[in-house]
């Protein structure tokens, strides 16, 4: 027996169900044959449902058009979203939803995190993968710190870090204030 067919479309399975139903097969037998040839691509309830649909007169094996928001973002709105993120890294999903209201907030979030590889860090959208430019900047900064450490000693105590935000602190000594008097 041949290996099961990979990446099978729903309409192909429904076409097989329609063909076998037209040949007079029962839903349980159709399910067994589909499992034998294609592997576990559908359950018995779906086969029964589609057999009933075809016996009621349905001929189309494709999904019917449904109302509601799309679950995918097309290329143009996705590029608009990327442009908004690059312009303002602190933009929220809710604000992005105002730019493309025809797409749900969940779909926008999935597109940003899964398709584009962004993640929210300290209220900013940042790419998950570091670019070569980012890696070079980190290397240069690390080398500067090592050089400064070799020259000055313990200066690292004055740096406070949190995630990827660096804050430098310097202790200032009070100085004399000079006041000039105008004639």
Image (cartoon, rainbow, N blue to C red):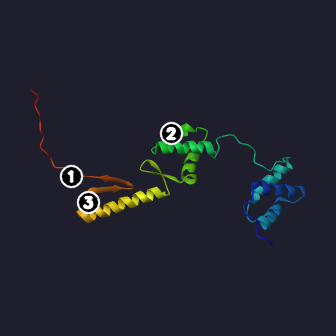
The disc at residue 95 is: 2
The disc at residue 171 is: 1
Local SS, label 3: helix
**For residue 58, above or below residue 42:** above
Q: On the rendered image, what quadrant is the C terminus found in?
A: top left
Q: Nearer the viewer, residue 117 or 25?
A: 117
Q: From mark 2 to mark 3, how far is it between C-alphas?
A: 39 Å
- Counting from the top left corner in percent of width and height, residue 129 is at 50, 57
**Sequence order check, earlier mark of 2 and 3:** 2
The disc at residue 76 is: none
Local SS, label 2: helix
**For residue 88, above or below residue 27:** above
Q: From mark 1 to mark 2, how far is it between C-alphas?
A: 40 Å
Q: Mark 3 points at which residue?
A: 157
- Counting from the top left corner in percent of width and height, residue 154 is at 24, 63
**Sequence order check, earlier mark of 1 and 2:** 2
């Amino acid at each position: 027996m041949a290996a099961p067919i990979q990446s099978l479309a729903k309409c192909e399975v429904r076409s097989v169900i329609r063909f076998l139903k037209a040949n007079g097969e029962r839903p349980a037998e159709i399910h067994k044959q589909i499992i034998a040839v294609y592997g576990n691509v559908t359950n018995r309830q779906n086969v029964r449902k589609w057999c009933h649909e075809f016996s009621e007169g349905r001929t189309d094996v494709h999904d019917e058009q449904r109302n509601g928001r799309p679950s995918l973002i097309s290329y143009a709105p996705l590029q608009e979203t990327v442009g908004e993120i690059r312009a303002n890294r602190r933009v929220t999903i809710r604000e992005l939803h105002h730019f493309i209201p025809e797409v749900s907030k969940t779909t926008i979030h999935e597109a940003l995190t899964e398709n584009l590889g962004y993640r929210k860090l300290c209220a900013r959208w940042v790419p998950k993968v570091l670019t070569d430019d980012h890696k070079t900047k980190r290397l240069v900064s690390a080398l500067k710190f090592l050089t400064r450490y070799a020259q000055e000693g313990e200066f690292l105590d004055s740096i406070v870090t949190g995630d990827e935000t660096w804050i430098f602190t310097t202790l200032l000594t009070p100085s004399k204030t000079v006041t000039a008097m105008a004639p």
